[in-house]
């Protein structure tokens, strides 16, 4: 019985540490006001400045930004605020094909 207790304590600590890890999430944002070839660069740059953002793909044609981020360091609200401050209001969309501007 006494040998099991330390093993269970170690297992519990490992499981607890795994649960505390950040989850990587991806969100697609519909981005307004993208009218020129420089716009995707500006949107991407503003998103990449947010701590926790790992990857950004901005499409001028689709008027979208697909952002992969660490949900313990960044939020969708922070991403939206970043694009809005840069002059490109955005909103999350469920289906990337549903974006319309």
Image (tube, rainbow, N blue to C red):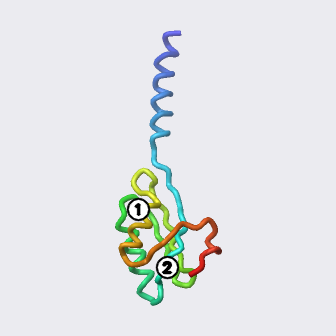
Spatial distance from mark 2 to mark 1, Cα to Cα? 17 Å
Mark 1 nearby-residue class (10 Å; few <14, some 14–19, many ≥20): some
For the point 53% across and 75% down, the residue is: 64
Image quarter of residue 51: bottom left
Q: Position of residue 26 (x, y in %)?
A: 53, 61
Q: Position of residue 6 (x, y in %)?
A: 46, 18
Among the two numbered marks 2 and 1 on one chain, the one whose residue lies closer to the N terminus: 2
Q: Position of residue 28 (x, y in %)?
A: 55, 68
- Above or below, 1 relative to 42: above
For the point 49% across and 21% down, the residue is: 7
Q: Secondary structure at mark 2?
A: loop
Q: Secondary structure at mark 1?
A: helix
The quadrant of the rendering that contains the C terminus is: bottom right
Total residue callouts: 2
Q: Which residue is mark 2?
A: 32
Which mark, residue 78?
1
């Amino acid at each position: 019985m006494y040998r099991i207790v330390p093993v269970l304590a170690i297992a519990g600590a490992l499981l607890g540490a795994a649960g505390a890890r950040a989850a990587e999430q991806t969100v697609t944002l519909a981005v307004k006001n993208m009218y020129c070839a420089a716009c995707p660069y500006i949107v991407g740059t503003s998103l990449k400045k947010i701590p926790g953002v790992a990857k950004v793909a901005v499409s001028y044609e689709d008027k979208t930004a697909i952002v992969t981020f660490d949900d313990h360091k960044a939020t969708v609200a922070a991403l939206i605020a970043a694009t809005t401050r840069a002059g490109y209001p955005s909103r999350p969309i469920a289906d990337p094909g549903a974006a319309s501007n």
